[in-house]
Amino acid sequence: MSRKAIDRRTFLALGAGAFAVAMTPFAFRRGRIVRRTIPVMGTIAEVAVVDDDAAAAQAAIDAAFAELRAVDAAMSRFSAGSDVGRLNREGARGPVAVSPETAHVLEEALRWARATDGRFDPCLGLAIELWDVNRRHEPPPAGAVRRLAGRHLYRALDVDTWRGAHVARFTDADVAVDLGGIAKGHAVDRAVAALRARGIGRAFVNAGGDLYAMGASEDNDPWQVGIQSAADPSRIERVIAVEDAAVATSGDYLQCFRFGGRRYHHLLDPGSGEPWRTDGRSLTIVAGRCVDADAGATACFGAPDPDAAVRRAAPGARMA
């Protein structure tokens, strides 16, 4: 894979938590960027490393990609053989063995659920399947929506150990785990740890909008992240400086359909069982860990005071 020049000042936020990095020629003064992309976790992930040693950069990127793939293999609800796939199939019948890492992410998700009184609920898999806004053209039957509304289903997920193994189970047959609001953030954190373990200090990792900027850019300034306008996705609404921090955005304007004059999007209100009704179109969270930026952007979308909500759940995190 050849090196490509990146203007460290141009990150383009593509909404609904998606970021892309615009490629622009630039005369580097401090190092060169080695950049690669792969399809993983249902999106395109990219890793870019600022380092003059191209071989070391490529090896570090390989290690980062391996971490992203490992999380995808364990936590995708679309794979019958993943931990989450097996848990959704068998968890209502009894304890299901999961990896220590999957157990850790389930516990992180439950921590966010408790801290937000269920605004973040990792057990809404059936409701997410019911709405399926990328394929639907009208809302699902009201009765089916009501059946899953206001249930606090996360309370029916138990994560424990049994005979030295990590296990999880459901105490409600309507539970189906979906870690789409947290697993990518965790995967980015894993990839960042892999880069650091190989001596990399300046890089970015972006998995479909869950992004971590490591250190400074190639000329020792912070990376600049552009936040896309929800009203006009072709326009950058504002730019934030990021250094050793994670960024995630949730928005209602990419994964959605319109019916009866209303936009129905993919961000579900666990209380009503339907997409959040809110005047805000997007929410961007900055945090020390990408797992918190990811969960925070999902949990606090539509909150009356999202900044206070995210700070309660993850001290140090904030709205951008």
Image (cartoon, rainbow, N blue to C red):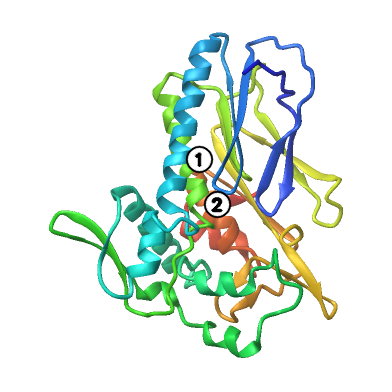
Residue for point 83% across, 81% down: 260
**Mark 1: amino acid:** Val
Q: Amino acid at mark 2?
A: Asp
The image position of residue 176, as x and y in percent, is 44, 70
Q: CA distance from mark 1 to mark 2?
A: 10 Å
Disc 2: which residue: 294
Q: Are marks 1 and 2 in contact (CB under 8 Å)?
A: yes
Secondary structure of the residue carrying tag 2 is: helix
| Circle 1 crowding by C-alpha within 10 Å: few under 14, some 14–19, many from 20 | many
Q: Residue at x 37, y 75 (%)?
A: 155
Residue bearing mark 1: 188
Residue 269, compared with residue 86, is above or below; it is below
In the displayed structure, 70 sits above or below 133; it is above
Count of numbered badges drawn on the protein = 2
| Relative to 169, 68 lies left or right | right
Q: Secondary structure at mark 1?
A: helix
Location of residue 134 in the rendering, given as x and y in whole percent from the top left corner: 70, 63
Q: In terms of depth relative to the viewer, which is nearer, 168 or 320?
A: 168
How crowded pointer 2 is (Cα within 10 Å; few <14, some 14-19, many 20+) is rated as: many
Q: Left or right: where does residue 252 sit relative to residue 299?
A: right
Residue 277 percent coordinates (x, y): 71, 75
Residue 316 visible in rendering: no
Between label 1 and label 2, give the one nearer the viewer. 1
